Amino acid sequence: MPDLDRNPISSFWKGDMSKAGKRGSAARTATMAAKTHCKRDHEYTEENTGKQVKGGREVRFCIQCREDQKAANRIGTRIER
């Protein structure tokens, strides 16, 4: 049976977890901020980028995707994500 006290992966979880999520969220924030196109390949420009406060943070969205979704909702079709 392996000695869990000497396993570096299991010892990670024994420490203070209050900072563990913060390290990951900073990296995710930087990754999202560096994106230049939405998931449907529309470029994030000043004209095509909307901003919204959601959960206490500011998020951006693609205006073209939102307009496409509104049009699809009006005619009762579904847009693939």
Image: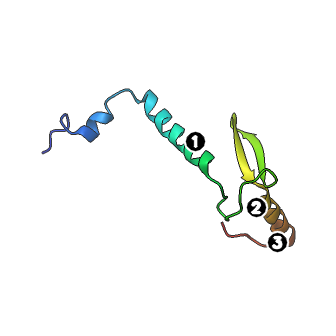
Mark 3 vs 2, N-terminal side:
2
Q: Quadrant of residue 70?
A: bottom right
Residue appearing at x 43%, y 34% in the figure? 20
Q: Which residue is mark 1?
A: 29
* Residue on which the image places disc 3: 76
- How packed mark 2 is, by other alpha carbons closer than 10 Å (few <14, some 14-19, many 20 or more), is some
Instruction: From the image, tell me which residue sits under label 2.
Output: 65
Q: Position of residue 30 (x, y in %)?
A: 56, 42
User: Is disc 1 placed on a helix, strand or loop?
Assistant: helix
- Which mark sits nearer the N-terminus, 2 or 1? 1
In terms of sequence position, does the residue under pointer 1 or pointer 3 come before the other?
Answer: 1
Query: What is the spatial separation of the Cα atoms under label 3 and label 2, in whole angstroms?
Result: 16 Å
* Residue 4 in the image, given as x and y percentages of width and height: 20, 38
Q: Residues within 10 Å of mark 3 (few under 14, many from 20)?
A: few
- Kind of residue at disc 3: Gly
The residue that appears at 62% across and 45% down in the rendered structure is: 33
